[in-house]
Image: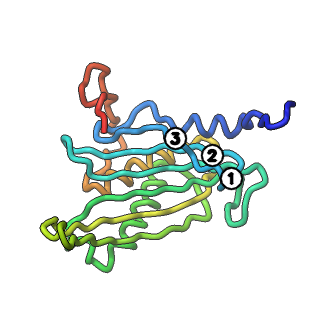
Amino acid sequence: MPLGDQPPPPATFLRAAQSLRLSEVRPEIELEDLPAPQRLAPYSAAIGASVYRDDDELAVGRLILLYDPDGQRGWEGPFRLVAYVRADMEPEITSDPLLGPVVWSWLTETLESHQADYSAAGGTVTRAVSEGFGNKAEDPVTTELELRASWSPAQEDLSGHVAAWCDLMCLAAGIPPLPPDVAALPRRRDDPESDRTK
């Protein structure tokens, strides 16, 4: 093997990375591939998502897949998923002292509802208030919610984890999840919403 050439990624990682790409998502959600961080694990992949209502972007997020055949401290397995979700929220909601536990329950309950088995979950819920000063003094005060979490999936097929993360983003955006017996409709190719550019 010539110097500098990297061996191809293991098949187990390629299968897991491929399962990040759901064939059907809710029409409010737009998924895209993102560059993955290179220094957290030997192999990684990432996707991003935005939640829209009409033309308003209500929430954004990233989901990163890390794979280390030898595992890492605290992972409890070779795979680790790292999730980030940010959404604008009303000030009275972000001031609720129960918001943190409620948002964390959104994550655990969506994972359970999609039968996405996991272990070693951890994360933080952050409330941020942005207030303008100087020539931005007229800007409205905004409040945001951020969730940063990671967990170790128990299976190689990550489609349930991606679906749970999408549901979590919708909850953060104020859009309730679909009932279990209702399927999301894929966007038609001639639907102008499917060609949305940011």
Say which residue appears at 55% left-offset and 60% top-offset: 150
Question: Between disc 1 and disc 3, whose residue precedes?
Answer: 1
Residue type of the residue flagged with mark 1 = Ala
Mark 1–mark 2 CB contact (< 8 Å) = yes
Given this view, does label 3 or label 2 mark the residue nearer the observer? Answer: 2
C-alpha distance separating marks 1 and 3: 21 Å
Say which residue appears at 36% left-offset and 52% top-offset: 169
Residue 134, picture quadrant: bottom left
Task: Identify the residue under disc 1.
Answer: 41
Quarter the C terminus occupies: top left
| Residue toward you, 91 or 118 | 91
| Residue toward you, 104 or 62 | 62
Say which residue appears at 38% left-offset and 64% top-offset: 146
Say which residue appears at 50% left-offset and 35% top-offset: 21
Task: Identify the residue under disc 3.
Answer: 159
Task: Identify the residue under disc 2.
Answer: 44
Given this view, does label 1 or label 3 mark the residue nearer the observer? Answer: 1
Residue 71, picture quadrant: bottom right
- The picture places residue 113, in percent across and down from the top left corner, at 44, 52
